[in-house]
């Protein structure tokens, strides 16, 4: 599995609101964690799998 969820704002950092930063973190970090939580049990049951 290629675990790649994310996006970036194209603007100066100082123009971002805290809500925008939190939303980006939710997607970029927790999105990847959630995908691994769903896929990992199958990989363990198959005794095979790679997360990139």
Image (cartoon, rainbow, N blue to C red):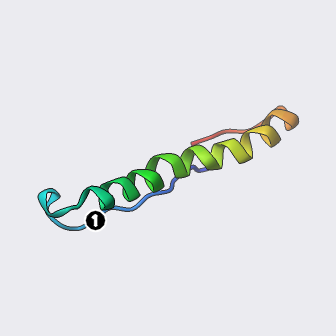
Look at the image and tell me whether residue 1 can be seen.
no
Q: Point out residue 36 in the picture as x, y percentages from the top left corner.
A: 65, 43
Asked whether, in this view, residue 24 is left or right of residue 35, the answer is left
Q: Residue at x 73, y 46 (%)?
A: 39
> Residue furthest toward the right?
45
Circle 1 Cα neighbour tier, 10 Å, few/some/many (<14 / 14–19 / ≥20): few
Kindly state the secondary structure of the residue where label 1 is placed.
Answer: loop
Q: Quadrant of residue 51?
A: top right
Q: Quadrant of residue 17?
A: bottom left
Pinpoint residue 32: horizontal percent, then vertical percent. Answer: 55, 48
In which quadrant is the C terminus drawn?
Answer: top right
Give me the residue at 59% from left, 50% from top: 2
Q: Residue at x 36, y 53 (%)?
A: 22
Q: Horizontally, is 47 left or right of 40 in the view?
A: right
Quadrant assignment, res 42 = top right
- Measuring from the top left, give residue 46's x and y in whole percent: 86, 37
Q: Nearer the viewer, residue 31 or 43?
A: 31
In-front residue for pair 49/36: 36
Instruction: Provide residue 37's location: percent of width, then percent of height.
Output: 68, 42
Q: Is residue 27 left or right of residue 42?
A: left
Residue labelled with disc 1: 9
């Amino acid at each position: 599995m290629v675990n790649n969820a994310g996006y970036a704002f194209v603007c100066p950092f100082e123009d971002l609101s805290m809500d925008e930063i939190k939303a980006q973190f939710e997607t970029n970090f927790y999105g990847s964690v959630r995908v691994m939580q769903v896929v990992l049990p199958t990989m363990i049951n198959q005794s095979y799998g790679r997360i990139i």
